[in-house]
Image (spheres, rainbow, N blue to C red):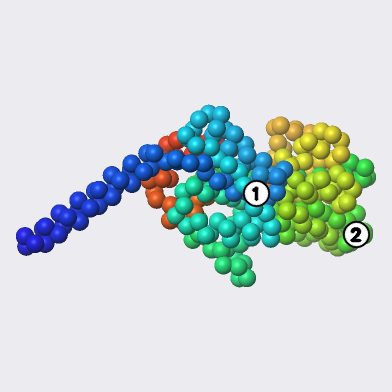
Amino acid sequence: MAKSAGVVTVLTAAALAASISGAAVAQSYPTKPIELVSPTSPGSGTDIYARALADIVQKNKLLPQPFLVQNRTGGGGLIAYNYFQTKRGDPYVMLAATGTIAIMAARADVNIGLENYTPLALFAVDPQAVMVNADLPYKTLKDLAEAARKQPDTIICAISNSLGSGRIVIHELEKLVPGAKFKFVTFKGGGEAVLSVAGGHTHFTTENLSEGLALLEAKKLRAIAITSLKRMPQLPDLPTAAEAGYPIDEGTIRGFVLPAGVPFLILGRLMYSGLIWLALPEW
């Protein structure tokens, strides 16, 4: 009995020591810059919001070390996700995540399950926008849909992922307009997709509005619809797809994840740094 009690005492002491040690590590974390991985190219919506977060953290001194954004592009995000899953337990790597992580987990041809991630926060749902080359005659979403119905497979859409939110918008529009059929071309990010439309290489895009703002202001693109059920307060004149007769409610889920196996105390450190509170208005 005395021996058992001694063993229990030793185990309790060891657990307490580990807890104290872990707390000390969490308190000092981070001691070096944190790599913030963007699976898309510079200028894309994911890249924009990753850099915006990095800027907020540094300007407001939320953490003693900065976020350094690294673009790891290719394969519709596959390059970044494959890299990320090799970082199990590493609290110095964070992923600017979108709903693509769920799509990757569902694919039978890759081995990137949800067990590879530790969710940190959901920050926003970024609506898609239908943006056409400003020199084209399409003034409304109905104009574009009817053109695709009358001349199927002739109108080309620029998107960033063949399985992403932009592609879903095309699919939904085709379902709602019998006979309509679009072609699409994929790019490494929404930034490249909108440039393709502005340059006349493709006809329109269904990527995030944030990716085309500069080109919209320069009159290189024309936004004809947004895929949310309500108009955006910032752009009250931009109609929704539903107003055109196509009730499409689709957007890019944006959040941040850490690798699997990151200690809980590290998560607590990030939460209490003030980082997590940035997400609360969107919840």
User: Dot 2 lies on which element?
Assistant: loop
Inspect the image, locate mark 1, and give the three-letter code of the amino acid beneath it.
Answer: Asn
Q: Report, in whole angstroms, how far the alpha carbon at label 1 lies from the one at label 2.
A: 33 Å
**Number of callouts:** 2
Marks 1/2 in contact by CB < 8 Å: the verdict is no
Residue in the image at 65% along x and 49% along y: 71
Instruction: Say which mark, if any, is on residue 71.
Output: 1
Residue 37, position as x, y percentages in the image: 59, 49
Residue in the image at 8% along x and 62% along y: 3
Residue 9, position as x, y percentages in the image: 15, 54
| Quadrant where the N terminus is found in the figure | bottom left
Q: Quadrant of residue 209?
A: top right
Vertical placement of 64 versus 102: above or below? above
Task: Tell me if mark 1 has few (under 14), some (14-19) or many (20+) residues whose alpha carbon lies within 10 angstroms of its own.
Answer: some
Is residue 218 or residue 237 the one in the foreground? 218
Residue extending furthest toward the front: 32
Residue tagged 2: 154
User: Dot 1 lies on which element?
Assistant: strand
Instruction: Say which mark, if any, is on residue 260.
Output: none
Residue 77, position as x, y percentages in the image: 65, 57
Inspect the image, locate mark 2, and give the three-letter code of the amino acid beneath it.
Answer: Thr
Whichever of callouts 1 and 2 sits on the residue coming sooner in the sequence is 1
Would you say residue 132 is visible in this rendering? no
Task: Tell me if mark 2 has few (under 14), some (14-19) or many (20+) residues whose alpha carbon lies within 10 angstroms of its own.
Answer: some
Is residue 3 left or right of 128 when viewed as pictured?
left
